[in-house]
Image: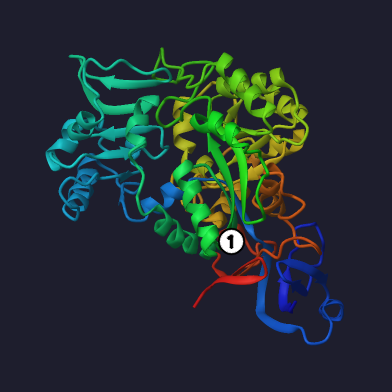
Amino acid sequence: MNVRVYRNAAIHPGTGTTPPAQAMAVRGETLLAVGSEADVREAAGPGAELIDLEGAAVLPGLYDAHIHTAQYAQSLDAVDLREVHTLDEALTRVAAHAARLRPGTWLFGGRWDSNTWDPPAQPDRYALDSVCPDLPVALPSADGHTVWANSAALRLVGIDAGTPDPLGGEIVRDADGEPTGILREAASYPLRDLMVSADLTDLLRAAQEDLLSLGLTSVHDIDGEDCRAAYLELREKGELKLRVHKAIPATHLEAAIDEGRRTGQGDDWFRTGPVKIFSDGALGSHTCHMSEPFAGDQGNAGIAVTPYDELVKLFGRAAGAGIAVATHAIGDRANRLVIDAYEAIGRTPGLRHRIEHAQHLRPGDLARMAGLGVAASMQPVHCTSDIDLVDALLAGHGVASYAWRGMLDHGVALAFGSDAPVEHPNPFAALHAAVTRTRPDGTPSGGWQPEQRLSTAEAITAHTLGAAYAAGEEERKGTLAPGKLADFIAVDTDPYRESPDAVLRTKVMTTVVGGEVRWQRS
C-alpha cells in the first residue's frame, strides 16, 4: 500500500504536544507516523509520495457533534429568512421565492426570528396568505421549534379550530379559537413530516462538499430515517466523503431495536448513533422547560415535550437494547429531569449518554452530569446568538448558561457542534464564540459572562476529540497519532498562534479524510 508523507506544515496533533510536528506519514486510511520530517520520512521508507502543505497549519479533522445535514442540504435551495429584520422583509422574500416554484409545490425554508424584528410583529397565517395564497407554506423558526404556516398548509394537514393541542405541543389560536398559523413543538410535527425531499441523496451529495470545505470530516447527524437511507445509498455507491454517526429518531426506536441496531454498529464511514429524544423546546420559542416563568411572560415556564415518566421508560428501553441516548434539553428544569432520568436507569457499560444543547442548568447539576458520565453536546454560536434573549427572558433565574468552563472544571465531557441549519456549520465561528463569548463584531466587549470562556486548545478539543468521545469513537478520531484515521485539515490561519478574530476568518485549504484529499481550495 502506498505511503504518503505530508510535510512543510505546523501540525497540531491535538494531544497537547508542543511544538507542532513537521510531517505525517499516511498508509491507506490511517496515520503511520507523526513528528519531525526526518523521523517521519524514515518511518515511511523509500518511495513514499511527498506532499507539500506549503506552510499551512494542520489540525485533526473537525467533528460536528450535532447537525441536521438533511435539513441543511434542503436549506441551501430554500427561502432564507435568517437575516431579515422586519415582517415586511420576510414576506417580500417569501413572495420572491414563491414566484420561482411550480403550482402545488410546498414552500419550505424559513429560520425567521421575530424576537429581532423592528418594529415588533407577530407572524401569522394571514400575513403569509397575503403574499402566497395558493402554495402551502411551512417555515421553521430560527431555533427550529416553531413553524409558521399559511392557511393552505393548515388545510392540507387538517389543522383547524377543532384540532386539539397534541401532547407536548401548542396550536396558537386567536381570540375566536382559530389557529393563527403558529405551531409550537409537537403541534408542528405533521408539517415537519412533509419537509422531506425525493432527491435527498443528490442534495446530501452536494452538501457534503460544502461541509468538507469548512473543515468538517465527521458529523453526528440528527435527522430522520430518510437521511439514513440517503447516506447508506451514498456509501454503497462509494460517494460518501465524510464520516457519519447517525442518530435514531425516537419515533423509530422500536423499529430500530427490532432491526437489531446498536450504537456503534457499522464501519469508520457510517455508524449507528444514539436515539434522539426531546425533553423540551427552545428559548426563542418560549418553549424550553424552566423552573420559573420567563420574564415578561408570566405563567409560561415552557413545555415538557416528553414527560418525565416517559423519559425514564424510553431511556431504559434504549439502553437495555444497546442504544445510547441523546436528549435535547435547554431549560434548567428540562436538564434536571433528564439528569434524574439518566440517574434512574443507571450507567450502561459501553454506552455514552448525552444531553444535546445543555444550555441552562442549575449550578449543582454540573457535578451530577459529571458523576453520571453524561456528555454535554453544545453549540457555541447558540450562546452568542442568544445573548440578548437570555438577558431578557432569564433575568434573575440563577442558572449557569452555556457553562463550558463549568462543564470542564466539573469533569463533564464537552462536544461541540453547530445545530445547522439553525446556525451556520462553520466550525471556526464556533471556536471564536467559545474563546471570546462575543458576537463576530466583538460585542459585548470583554465577552458575555466571560468566566465561562475556553482556551483555544480546549475549544478545538471539544470540536475534535470531545465530539469523537461523545460518539464512542475516540480510539479512531479526534487526534493525529499513529494508528488513528488520517482525517485532517490544512488551514491558512494557525489558531494556536493567531488571534480569535483571525481564527474567525480562517479558510480551509485542504480537507483529507481517510488519507485522501476530499476537498481542496482552487
Q: Count the marks: how many? A: 1
Answer left or right for 421 relative to 308. Answer: left
Residue at x-position 72% and y-position 71%:
28
Q: Secondary structure at mark 1?
A: helix
Residue at x-position 29% and y-position 21%:
172
Answer left or right for 36 relative to 137. Answer: right
Answer left or right for 255 relative to 367. Answer: left
Q: Is residue 19 visible?
A: yes
Q: Position of residue 64 (x, y in %)?
A: 58, 50
Q: Is residue 362 visible?
A: no
Q: Position of residue 31 (x, y in %)?
A: 76, 67
Depicted 404 relative to depicted 93: above or below:
above
Q: Between 513 and 139, which is closer to the camera in this rendering?
A: 513
Q: Residues within 10 Å of mark 1 (few under 14, many from 20)?
A: many
The residue furthest bottom is: 47
Q: Position of residue 379 (x, y in %)?
A: 56, 43
Q: Position of residue 411 (x, y in %)?
A: 77, 36
Image quarter of residue 450: top right
Q: Between 46 and 183, which is closer to the camera in this rendering?
A: 46
Residue at x-position 35% and y-position 50%:
198
Depicted 206 relative to depicted 254: above or below:
below
Amino acid type, callout 1: Val
Quarter of the image that includes the N terminus: bottom right
Q: Between 392 and 422, which is closer to the camera in this rendering?
A: 422
Q: How is the image coloured?
A: rainbow
Q: Which residue is mark 1?
A: 503
Answer left or right for 262 relative to 25. Answer: left
Depicted 137 relative to depicted 158: above or below:
below
Residue at x-position 62% and y-position 21%:
336
